Amino acid sequence: MARAVGVLVLLLAAIALPMRRVQPQVPLLKPNQPILSADAQLKAQGWAPAGDPHLQAFERDLAGNRLTSLSGCSGTGAGFCRYDYRRGGRQLEVITVAGPQGSGLVLRWSESPSLGR
């Protein structure tokens, strides 16, 4: 009986192993990572910038960069900005806050199914 259970565990592990390899690569961003570094990392992982091409000039000024993933910035003192990316039916939202010299630092991020914006 114990041998049968052991064989079953090995069989299930062998089936699950290939399934793990086909899972999409989860972005490994870090809190306080500069957005320019995060943007380069995400592009290298196959994420395509999906920002808003019709941004207001003040939003570009608040962001302090020309990244095409920029979707908007709030006018609040905290300097929150949102950057969007897409890959294979998935959407990634990265929120930054103003850092030293106005550079954006990653605050948080979330991945979800793409809504086809």
Image: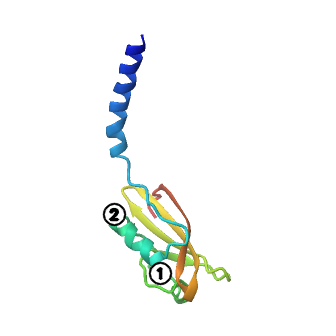
Q: Secondary structure at mark 1?
A: loop
| Residue 8: image location, x then y, percent | 38, 21
Between residue 66 and residue 102, name the one nearer to us: 102
Q: Secondary structure at mark 2?
A: loop
| Residue 88: image location, x then y, percent | 36, 56
Q: Residue at x 41, y 78 (%)?
A: 68
Q: Which residue is mark 1?
A: 54
Q: Is residue 3 above or below residue 108?
A: above
Between residue 67 and residue 58, name the one nearer to us: 67
Q: Is residue 25 above or below residue 103?
A: above
Amino acid type at circle 2 is Gly
Q: CA distance from mark 2 to mark 1?
A: 24 Å
Q: Is residue 14 above or below residue 105?
A: above
Q: Residue at x 38, y 54 (%)?
A: 25
> For this view, does 65 lie left or right of residue 78?
left
> For this view, does 35 lie left or right of residue 21?
right
Q: Earlier in the sequence, mark 2 or mark 1?
A: 2
Amino acid type at circle 1 is His
| Residue 74: image location, x then y, percent | 62, 79
Q: Which residue is mark 2?
A: 46
Q: Residue furthest front?
A: 2
| Residue 110: image location, x then y, percent | 53, 60
Q: Residue at x 57, y 81 (%)?
A: 99
Q: Residue furthest right?
A: 77
Task: Give the class, few, some or many, for how many residues have Cα within 10 Å of label 1's Cα (few <14, many ≥20).
Answer: few
Q: Is residue 3 above or below residue 99?
A: above
Q: Residue at x 37, y 64 (%)?
A: 47
Examine the rendering and report whether any part of residue 99 can be seen. Answer: yes
